[in-house]
């Protein structure tokens, strides 16, 4: 088999190349030729094609994502901002936290178990490459119609993949989302979030500094998986009996990843590493070009030294392989032996594949032949940037005009009760225990809160009790009704969920799941959502530390609901004061913080009962949201709450139901004057939370609310002698719901569908 | 003198830090033991923690039993050293034939993580002496292969000799024969348990602090046997 | 009564962490010359009555859709008398 | 170069939940006459050079101690040329 060398590219400049099959546009190919002053070699073409893909280059989203950097006031807590593997925030006491969410949507549809498993693997490596110890994962998921038989295949595979990988890695799963909507039928969303902690001094960045330093590839061997596309190149460029089409799916090895975590943290803490980078999308192409362009600017790589699982791999395939569980480190020559010793201790294979230089070029040789000679920045950072056309589609008018006003509402006590029972069992509101019980939430012994609480909470420092809380949220129906406001509502919900537990929101990450950027309507949704999110961050003073964009989530012409998942991180100085969601004490008072209006567009009630989506999403007042969070945190600090829970999907009915099911203790409630029972129970007005206040803290609580001029309504109290929800003033009548019955309804749904 | 309790880390062990924390909260000193080192460093007892030793790709605990530290441990166990195997540690103990039977795939085929009620059935073992017989405790359970199986004869023997140390209550979470959650060897020094006492040692992070009893039992037994002074 | 055995193995290009773990253990146990180990699944089906062409075709179909995932696995079907 | 195949199956008395689940699925998919399904493991060892008596004995030993657990599993070893 002949190798396409740099000298061949010079000697035979007009050889035709399969750039289109590799996903490059003609003008992109031309600009590669321009950058190089010649045609690329097939290896160079391989590198550019993966690095300039939408996934790696953010070519359609870049112009909009800039807002996250431009609009957010630099917040003191940002230690490392957007652009690195993951952002890092200061949480005080010398501790820093890094967190990031990424998508693995498409692979998870093709091979649900492995797709989801490797999604967890990938985000965890991003976190270790910052020098942090991963301490928890979360998994926001979206599935199609729960009654469709393919949903069963996808969901069961994805759930066991996330568990199979995360459990074996020893990371507690502390939260996530399971949402069903037909728009995800051919396009489930698997977003994976990882949180890592470290001391400030341990922060590491991905750059290749220090002339003469060695570039070490370590971890799993490189194989022929995850390189579906490049086989085109192999078969086009080489003779007919070149390698067969390689699979595009990768298989994860969580045990190797666990060794990689321990090995990486040990070399980092021993001071053996100058720069470090994980290998994810685009494999060695990405790691070497990013390391080189962030450092001294040059690197030479001996590609034939890469340890292979399959000796028939071509250099192009090796450059593009997305084999999992690999990392790249830059190490001073005098420390190579010590580095290798640590690898040996953990049974991790490692090999020096390159050297840092100041040539300004990334050069790669293969058995003595030069096959790549490129400016590394041109591969890693200077990819194409598109200003894709975007336009508000006409159908938005129709959608916004068709509000929920005419949907039939329950109008008697009996109908309210029946609606409540039905809503408790809908797939979106039902208990997710069937899913979450497949995840280990206890490992590491620092989980303070996990599902079904509003946020996951992890103790960071066992001595002081310092902790962090993280929540991810997005009601995509709101985004479908108004992408600007919908994205802000997602942010607000996540922010509130963190505050409800007593943690102060500090920073956000996001995973922007959208349809095709080539569709101006989708691009409009994207632009609006990013702008909404950036504006919200500016107003709330919460920086975006990083995130991920996933485009092309659509089946044929039909895109998924735009789904910008927002993850908010908050800090709590002492986890002992966290606010749980379940009440415990007799006579504690139940309050609603916030205002309830008739807002049912995009609500779970409209979706579940009427399959309706239309109108305008709830009004959002960000200033009020901030005040609410201040009250929730102050209440936690002042020990004013015995429990608290946010109000979102399913309205107050769902909030109350979840609190009761978690608690098992009954309550007496009354629909507040001025509201009808239906609106009170199922409206999804934003900026609300239910708090439970011990009687002896009542005055202080009311003083706090008054000092912030925040609306607060008492609507019930805890009744230790009862095991039911007693609700009065329901259209002139009262209803009683047995908590055990609610729990049965809630817990039956998922096992019935997927068990 | 405070007792020193070893915690073995295999590649893929996950709950080793938790086991060490539990030992310390109970008043002991935890000593890290490494799978590749055939040395128990003179500890007075050993905990085999939960996790996925060597990935558990073959069979849980199957590869761990061939590690250098296990050769030493098997001899020490036969010599009376107190050993507690939790979850994966229990699997390693059955694979090493320090305890009878085997742990198989959960009957419902899923990994399961839940707060599990148990009834203590034996308080003669080194690791359960601090409990009452019949005491009900609540500790986390998390496993994919936790179904305890053995032939009828072995099961009868275990029952007859009072060697079942804990049974699942309310729900049998994995199809274990006769609801068995944990057993001991005839001598009472080697105990295997599927649920995780080390995750129920602090109010903030566990469903209870019932798990501490296993570790305080050990420390008391060591004092009583004069191995260490109170 | 016929016995049908379906063997399912990961495709060659796909990483086989289980096989790799076993191989490591075999080497540690002193078995020499082990070049590769792959771990697969075996389904042994006891079928009442004859396995005719039609039934075999049905089993092939099930092997390719249920018992294996063609994205990452290959399978073989054998009928044992 | 020889290929040694070790098949490991749960003993008959031991409940095989995976086999049972597969059986349920086969029946749902309309396969008739399925009397029983057992799921086992198959290890395919590629061994450099010849597999002589001594090596085969070693492999048997490994199959009985490492690759299977005699409390719950049986195994067979076959050498394929
Ligand atoms: N939606 C987004 N919001 C903010 N930052 C983003 C977003 N999407 C991507 N980024 C940032 O762009 C950089 C490149 O993203 P990515 O390619 O996902 O990182 P990596 O190469 O580490 O996987 C990262 O720093 C990431 O945080
Ligand atoms: Mg990265």
Image (cartoon, coloured by chain):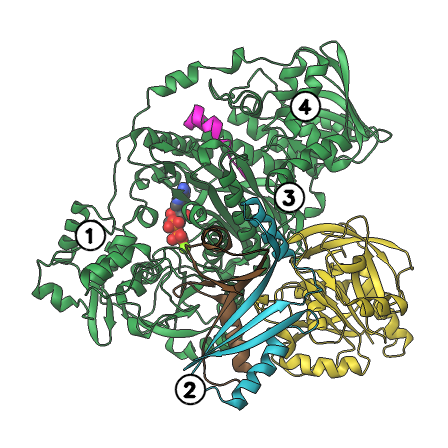
Chain colours: A green, B yellow, C brown, D cyan
Q: Which residue is mark 3?
A: A434
Q: Which residue is nearer to you in this view: A243 or A173?
A: A243
Can residue A608 be seen from the camera position used here? yes
Q: Is tag 3's residue or tag 1's residue first in the polypeptide sequence?
A: 1
Residue C76, quarter of picture: bottom left
Q: What chain letter is assigned to the residue under label 3?
A: A
Residue A279: where, in percent of width, then height? 39, 60
Between marks 4 and 3, how big is the CA–CA gap? 21 Å
Q: Confirm whether circles 4 and 2 share one chain.
A: no
Number of residues whose C-alpha sits closer than 10 Å to that of mark 3, classed few (under 14), some (14–19) or many (20 or more) = some
* Location of residue A694 with respect to B222 vertically, above or below: above
4 vs 2, front mark: 2
Q: Which residue is mark 4?
A: A420
Q: Is residue B41 magenta?
A: no
Q: Which residue is mark 1?
A: A19
Q: Secondary structure at mark 1?
A: loop
2 vs 3, front mark: 2
The C terminus of chain B - image quarter: bottom right
Q: Secondary structure at mark 2?
A: loop
Residue A711: where, in percent of width, then height? 64, 20
Between marks 2 and 1, how big is the CA–CA gap? 45 Å
Q: Confirm whether circles 4 and 3 share one chain.
A: yes
Magenta residues span A472-485
Query: Which residue lies at the image location 73% right of the left edge and 59% below the top edge?
Result: B196
Number of residues whose C-alpha sits closer than 10 Å to that of mark 4, classed few (under 14), some (14–19) or many (20 or more) = many
Q: What chain letter is assigned to the residue under label 2?
A: D
């Amino acid at each position: 088999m002949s190798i396409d060398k740099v000298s061949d590219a010079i000697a035979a400049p007009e050889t035709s190349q399969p750039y289109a099959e590799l996903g490059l546009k003609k003008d992109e190919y031309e600009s590669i030729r321009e950058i190089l002053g010649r045609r690329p070699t097939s290896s160079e073409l391989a590198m550019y094609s993966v690095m300039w893909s939408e996934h790696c280059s953010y070519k359609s989203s870049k112009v909009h994502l800039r807002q996250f950097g431009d609009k957010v006031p630099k917040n003191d807590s940002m230690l490392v901002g957007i652009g690195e593997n993951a952002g890092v925030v200061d949480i005080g006491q010398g501790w820093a936290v890094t967190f990031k969410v990424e998508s693995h949507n498409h692979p998870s549809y093709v091979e649900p178990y492995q797709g989801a498993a490797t999604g967890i693997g990938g985000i965890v490596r991003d976190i270790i490459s910052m020098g942090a110890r991963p301490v928890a994962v979360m998994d926001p998921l979206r599935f199609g119609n729960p009654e469709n038989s393919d949903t069963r295949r996808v969901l069961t595979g994805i759930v066991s993949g996330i568990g199979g990988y995360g459990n074996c890695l020893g990371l507690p799963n502390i939260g996530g989302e399971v949402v069903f909507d037909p728009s995800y039928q051919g396009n489930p969303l698997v977003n994976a979030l990882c949180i890592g902690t470290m001391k400030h001094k341990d922060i590491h960045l991905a750059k290749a500094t220090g002339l003469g330093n060695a570039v070490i590839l370590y971890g799993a061997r490189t194989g022929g998986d995850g390189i579906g596309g490049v086989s085109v190149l192999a078969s086009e460029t080489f003779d007919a009996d070149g390698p067969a089409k390689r699979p595009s799916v990768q298989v994860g090895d969580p045990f190797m990843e666990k060794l990689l975590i321990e090995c990486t943290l040990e070399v980092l803490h021993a001071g053996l590493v100058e720069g470090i980078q994980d290998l994810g999308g685009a494999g060695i192409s990405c790691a070497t070009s990013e390391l080189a362009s962030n450092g001294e600017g040059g690197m030479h790589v001996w590609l034939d030294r890469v340890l292979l699982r399959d000796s028939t791999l071509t250099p192009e395939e090796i450059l593009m392989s997305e084999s999992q569980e690999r990392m790249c480190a830059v190490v001073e020559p005098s420390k190579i032996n010590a580095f290798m010793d640590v690898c040996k201790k953990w049974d991790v294979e490692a090999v020096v594949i390159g050297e840092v230089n100041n040539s300004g070029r990334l050069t790669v040789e293969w058995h003595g032949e030069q096959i790549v000679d490129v400016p590394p920045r041109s591969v890693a950072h200077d990819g194409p940037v598109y200003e894709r056309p975007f336009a508000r589609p006409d159908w938005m008018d129709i959608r916004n005009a068709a509000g929920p006003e005419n949907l039939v509402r329950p109008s008697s006590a009996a109908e309210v009760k029946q609606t409540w029972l039905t809503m408790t069992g809908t797939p979106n509101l039902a208990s997710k225990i069937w899913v979450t019980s497949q995840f280990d939430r206890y490992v590491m012994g620092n989980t303070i809160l996990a599902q079904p609480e509003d946020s996951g909470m992890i103790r960071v420092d066992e001595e002081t009790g310092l902790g962090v809380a993280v929540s991810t949220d997005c009601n995509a129906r709101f985004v479908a009704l108004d992408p600007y406001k919908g994205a802000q509502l997602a942010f607000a919900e996540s922010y509130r969920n963190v505050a409800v537990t007593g943690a102060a929101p500090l920073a956000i990450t996001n995973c922007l799941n959208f349809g095709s950027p080539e569709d101006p309507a989708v691009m409009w949704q994207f632009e609006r959502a990013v702008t909404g999110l950036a504006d919200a961050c500016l107003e709330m003073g919460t920086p975006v530390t990083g995130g991920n964009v996933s485009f092309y989530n659509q089946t044929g012409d039909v895109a998924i609901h735009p789904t910008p998942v927002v993850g908010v991180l908050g800090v709590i100085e002492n986890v002992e004061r966290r606010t749980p969601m379940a009440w415990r004490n007799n006579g504690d008072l139940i309050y609603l913080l916030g205002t309830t209006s008739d807002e049912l567009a995009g609500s779970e009630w409209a979706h579940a009962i009427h399959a309706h989506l239309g109108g305008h999403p709830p009004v959002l007042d960000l200033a009020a949201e901030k005040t609410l969070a201040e009250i929730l945190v102050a209440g936690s600090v002042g020990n004013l709450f015995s429990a608290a829970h946010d109000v979102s999907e399913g309205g107050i009915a769902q909030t109350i139901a979840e609190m009761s099911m978690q608690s098992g203790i009954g309550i007496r409630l009354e629909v507040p004057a001025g509201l009808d029972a239906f609106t009170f129970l199922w409206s999804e007005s934003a900026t609300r939370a239910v708090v439970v206040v011990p009687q002896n803290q009542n005055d202080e609580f009311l003083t706090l609310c008054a000092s912030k001029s925040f609306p607060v309504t008492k609507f019930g109290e805890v009744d230790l002698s009862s095991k039911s929800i007693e609700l009065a003033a329901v259209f002139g009548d009262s209803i009683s719901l047995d908590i055990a019955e609610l729990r049965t309804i809630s817990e039956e749904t998922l096992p019935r569908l997927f068990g | 003198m405070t007792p020193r309790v070893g915690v073995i880390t295999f590649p893929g062990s996950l709950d080793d830090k938790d086991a060490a924390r539990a030992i310390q909260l109970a008043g002991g000193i935890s000593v890290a033991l490494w799978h590749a080192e055939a040395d128990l460093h003179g500890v007075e007892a050993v905990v085999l923690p939960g996790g996925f030793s060597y990935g558990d790709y073959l069979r849980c605990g199957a590869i761990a039993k061939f590690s250098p530290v296990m050769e030493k441990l098997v001899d020490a166990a036969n010599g009376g050293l107190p050993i507690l195997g939790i979850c994966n540690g229990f699997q390693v103990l059955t694979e090493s034939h320090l305890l009878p039977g085997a742990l198989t795939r959960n009957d419902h085929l899923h990994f399961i993580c839940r707060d599990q009620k148990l009834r203590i059935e034996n308080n003669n073992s080194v690791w359960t002496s601090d409990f009452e017989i019949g005491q009900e405790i609540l500790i986390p359970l998390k496993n994919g292969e936790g179904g305890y199986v053995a032939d009828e004869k072995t099961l009868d023997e275990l029952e007859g000799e009072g060697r079942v140390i804990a049974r699942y209550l309310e729900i049998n979470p994995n199809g274990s024969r006769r609801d068995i959650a944990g057993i001991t060897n005839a001598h009472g020094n080697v105990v295997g348990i599927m649920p995780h006492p080390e995750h129920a040692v602090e109010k903030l992070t566990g469903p209870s602090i019932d798990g501490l009893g296993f570790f305080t039992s050990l420390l008391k037994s060591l004092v009583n046997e004069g191995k260490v002074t109170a | 009564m016929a016995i049908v055995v379906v063997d399912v193995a990961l495709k060659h290009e796909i990483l086989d962490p289980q096989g790799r773990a076993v191989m490591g253990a075999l080497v540690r146990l002193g078995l020499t010359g082990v070049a590769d180990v792959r771990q697969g699944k075996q389904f042994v089906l006891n079928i009442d009555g004859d396995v005719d062409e039609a039934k075999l075709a049905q089993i092939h179909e099930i092997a390719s859709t249920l018992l294996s995932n063609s994205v990452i696995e290959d399978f073989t079907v054998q009928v044992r008398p």
